[in-house]
Image (cartoon, rainbow, N blue to C red):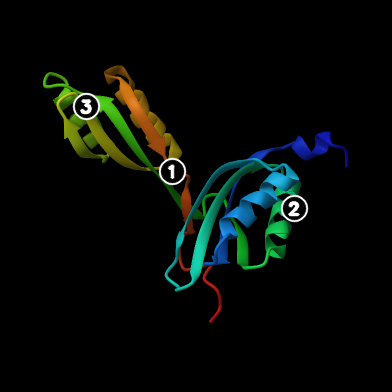
Amino acid sequence: MTTNDLYDDVTRSVLSVLVQDVDGIITRVTAMFTRRGFNLVSLATAKTETEGINRITVVVDASEHAVEQITKQLHKLIHVIKVIRLEEDKFIARSLMLVKVNANNSNRPQVVDAANIFRARVVDVSPDSVVIEATGTSSKLKALLEVLEPFGIRELVQSGRVALNRGAKTLAPSK
């Protein structure tokens, strides 16, 4: 395999990683990506329904071979319980976005209407701006930004994706 083969057929993959909730686990996971030259698109982590277990959702642009290597390397880390690659169309993924938009008395109704169309919520109002909270797929959040752009976007922050398998399939560790 040549070096160029490693970059052929790069696709976006979502990995769901269950880890023990110990100090430094996020550092160890991200360091593994850095050491091996893999580029993280996003990383989100939070507690799960099981005490002492966290879920890390990793989004990476990589070839099939690279994703296999990433999975193997994650399995080698101490405190990693389980790693699965979520299959396209068999999982639900969402991101959170907060966006501060210029809004005065004359255009505030249009800004609020735009947020409502996308089932977003206005979470803060000031005399010259509003903050909108939106959750959804990347394409939905991008479309909302395109609608809000003419009003003037002051600030924007967006989380990485969180994801779960559809249906009864679960990543939860065996009890």
| Residue 157, quarter of the rendered image | top left
Of the residues shown, which amino acid type is indicated by label 3? Ser
User: How far apart, in angstroms, are the residues tagged by discs 3 and 1?
Assistant: 21 Å
Of the residues shown, which amino acid type is indicated by label 1? Ser
Decide: few, some or many residues near mark 2? Use Cα within 10 Å; few <14, some 14-19, many ≥20: some
Describe the element under mark 2 as helix, strand or loop. Answer: helix
Left or right: residue 37 compared with residue 139? right
Left or right: residue 125 compared with residue 149? left
Residue corresponding to mark 3: 129
Describe the element under mark 1 as helix, strand or loop. Answer: loop
Q: Residue at x 48, y 72 (%)?
A: 52
User: In the displayed structure, would residue 112 be above or below residue 21?
Assistant: above
Front position in the image: 35 or 116: 35
Residue corresponding to mark 1: 159
User: In the displayed structure, would residue 115 be above or below residue 47?
Assistant: above
Front position in the image: 8 or 50: 50
User: How far apart, in angstroms, are the residues tagged by discs 2 and 3?
Assistant: 46 Å
Which of the two marks, 1 or 2, is nearer to us in this view? 1
